[in-house]
Image (cartoon, rainbow, N blue to C red):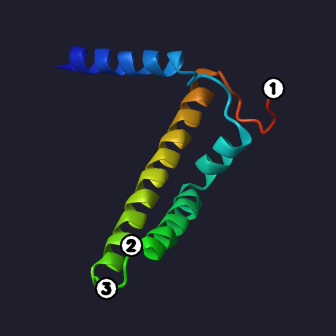
Amino acid sequence: MANWRRSLGDAFWALDRALGGQRRPTRLQKWVARHPIGAALYAAVPFTLFFLMVSSEEEPDNPLFAVFFGLITGLVFGLTAAAERLRQRRLKRLGVWDGSSTTRR
């Protein structure tokens, strides 16, 4: 079981490297990693307001669905921000990035 799990993890990190996961984070990625809840709220609030605007007023359940989809959007963005935080922590651990705020061009 351990070999299967390890090979799955190795495959994931190989795919991550192929997609550019070992590049230094941008300024926005650093901010999102430092503020995952803020990033989730910045995404969820506009989506919720948009869903509320396009929902019809005749149905009483439509505002509930708008809030629900806004919460789902915030959850997805929050989990993505948490994953970015873990990625940056891994880059520091591997020595690819020293955690500095300067970026190379």
Residue with the mark numbered 1: 104
Image quadrant in which the C terminus is located: top right
What secondary structure is marked by label 2? Answer: helix
Measure how far apart labels 1 and 2 are at the Cα level: 41 Å
Task: Give the residue displayed 48% in from the left and 75% down from the top.
Answer: 53
Q: Amino acid at mark 3?
A: Glu
Measure how far apart labels 3 and 1 are at the Cα level: 54 Å
In the image, residue 80 lies at what x, y percent?
48, 45
Q: Amino acid at mark 2?
A: Val
Tag shown at residue 58:
3
Q: Could you tell which of marks 1 and 2 lies nearer the N-terminus?
A: 2
Q: Quadrant of residue 28?
A: top right
Foreground: disc 1 or disc 2: 2
Farthest residue, direction left: 1
Foreground: disc 2 or disc 3: 3
Residue with the mark numbered 2: 67
Q: Amino acid at mark 1?
A: Arg
Position above or below: 85 against 71: above
Q: Is residue 35 left or right of residue 69?
A: right
Task: Give the residue displayed 67% in from the left and 49% down from the top.
Answer: 31
**The one of 95 and 15 positioned closer to us in this rendering:** 15
In the image, residue 11 lies at what x, y percent?
37, 16
